[in-house]
Image (tube, grey):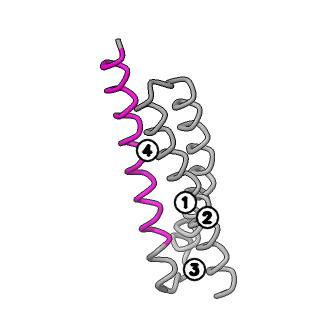
Amino acid sequence: MMEGMEMTCFEIISNVGMARGSYIEAIDLATEGRFEEAEAKIEEGNTFFAKGHDAHTDLVQKEAAGERTEIILILVHAEDQLMSAESFKILAEKFIAVNKKIYK
């Protein structure tokens, strides 16, 4: 079970880390006025984020079904990275919107 839990955590961390990187790239592109590319990076990030979120949802569903989840540091880290990526998505979308106004 622990090996499965650790693998799931690394799946979350890997995917949401890629998502966060895509969102940061979107911010950089929006700052340069490259909005189509920025929006493509948001979509790329969303694809990675969905994979990480799905892995996390599987853990939540298992616990809801009665399978106890041991709280280990790597799980806490995975959830922290998930929330960080989600925050960067929100910020990236705001940066794109603000920069579109500036570039008009």
> What secondary structure is marked by label 1?
helix
Amino acid beneath label 4: Lys
Density class for disc 1 (Cα within 10 Å; few <14, some 14-19, many ≥20) is many
Q: Nearer the viewer, residue 62 or 79?
A: 79
> What secondary structure is marked by label 3?
loop
User: Which numbered tag is attached to residue 67?
Assistant: 3
Q: CA distance from mark 2 to mark 4?
A: 16 Å
Q: CA distance from mark 2 to mark 3?
A: 24 Å
User: Which numbered tag is attached to residue 89?
Assistant: 4
Direction from residue 54 to residue 73 in the image, left or right: left
Q: CA distance from mark 3 to mark 1?
A: 27 Å
Density class for disc 4 (Cα within 10 Å; few <14, some 14-19, many ≥20) is many
Q: Is residue 93 above or below residue 24?
A: above
Amino acid beneath label 3: Glu
> What secondary structure is marked by label 2?
helix
Question: Can you identify the residue that label 2 sits on?
Answer: 14
Q: CA distance from mark 4 to mark 3?
A: 31 Å
Q: Which residues are magenta?
A: 78-103
Question: Can you identify the residue that label 1 sits on?
Answer: 17
Amino acid beneath label 2: Ser
- Residue 95: horizontal and vertical position, in percent? 36, 34
Q: Is residue 66 above or below residue 38?
A: below
Q: CA distance from mark 4 to mark 1?
A: 12 Å
Tag 1 or tag 3, which sits nearer the N-term? 1
Tag 3 or tag 2, which sits nearer the N-term? 2
- Residue 55: horizontal and vertical position, in percent? 61, 63
- Residue 33: horizontal and vertical position, in percent? 44, 24
If the image is split into quadrants, where does the N terminus sit? bottom right
